[in-house]
Amino acid sequence: MSDAGAHRALPGLTFPEEHLKRLARDLTVKFAGVFGAETIERYVLESYVSLLRTSKVKAYLVTNTIRFATDRLTALAQAKGAIEHPVPEVLFVCEQNAGRSQMAAVLTNALSGGAVHVRSAGSAPSPELNPQVVAVMAEIGLDFSEAFPKPLTDDVVQAADVVITMGCGDACPIYPGKQYQDWALTDPADLPLDEVRVIRDQIKDRVEHLLETLSPKDKQA
């Protein structure tokens, strides 16, 4: 049976939260004709378990799972060419996804005015965002209210046109036809606010340059 035609629940598969079961049903409708129920259920549960391993604030676990699973399925559908890919996709990857990659993602989203779609991830995600990073971004009017550390997954790499790494070594898989950059930036973990501000401003400069130099191929996505 093809993936798009598989609509049976996985045998023996149980959901730890009723919200997750409803999410899987909703996503089966959203991605009808693209992914079957089995694939969607697996993605929802994998996303939940991945976040459960590192999440410090359990109150937001289900909400974050909804966002994470939906984004991963969207990325996979984009990579398969099953849904539209109207703007360039940029992925920022650092180790903890708590500071540098999060700042880069929020700044790119703000400075591009929606002309670029951004994702971020971590090779070894932290339980929570760096509070110093949250503070220095708030100083320039950007908030992290919907941001949370996420593990790096293959689907978001496949969907990206540009992959920018920041101190995560060789954790990111390499796919042909993508643009890869490595930004040598200091990890803001445990640094005072003044030093985190410097990193924020360095990232802003790099993001501005990135937005100016995206190739026509990237812009057409």
Image (tube, grey):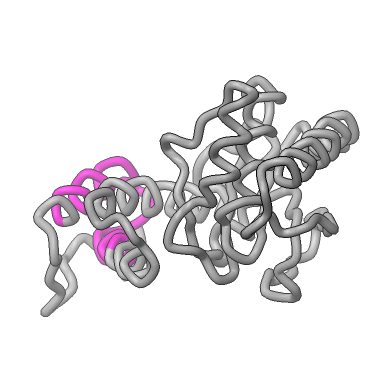
Residue 134 in the image, given as x and y percentages of width and height: 54, 39
> Taking 106 as reference, is 80 above or below it?
below
Residue 17 in the image, given as x and y percentages of width and height: 13, 59
Q: Is residue 156 left or right of residue 100?
A: left
Q: Residue furthest bottom?
A: 12
- Is the N terminus in the top left, top right, bottom left or bottom right quadrant? bottom left
Q: Is residue 45 left or right of residue 160?
A: left
Q: Is residue 48 left or right of residue 173?
A: left
Q: Is residue 2 left or right of residue 119?
A: left
Quadrant position of residue 127: bottom left
Q: Which residues are magenta?
A: 21-44
Q: Nearer the viewer, residue 213 or 161?
A: 213
**How many labels sit on residues?**
0
Residue 5 seen in this snapshot: no
Magenta stretch containing residue 43, yes or no? yes
Residue 34 in the image, given as x and y percentages of width and height: 39, 51
Q: Nearer the viewer, residue 140 or 184?
A: 140
Q: Residue at x 63, y 66 (%)?
A: 95
Magenta stretch containing residue 27, yes or no? yes
Quadrant position of residue 140: top right
Residue 28 in the image, given as x and y percentages of width and height: 25, 49
Q: Residue at x 51, y 41 (%)?
A: 83
Q: Residue at x 66, y 42 (%)?
A: 193
Residue 161 seen in this snapshot: yes
> Taking 42 as reference, is 36 above or below it?
above
User: What is the chief secondary structure element of the magenta stretch?
Assistant: helix
- Is the C terminus in the top left, top right, bottom left or bottom right quadrant? top right
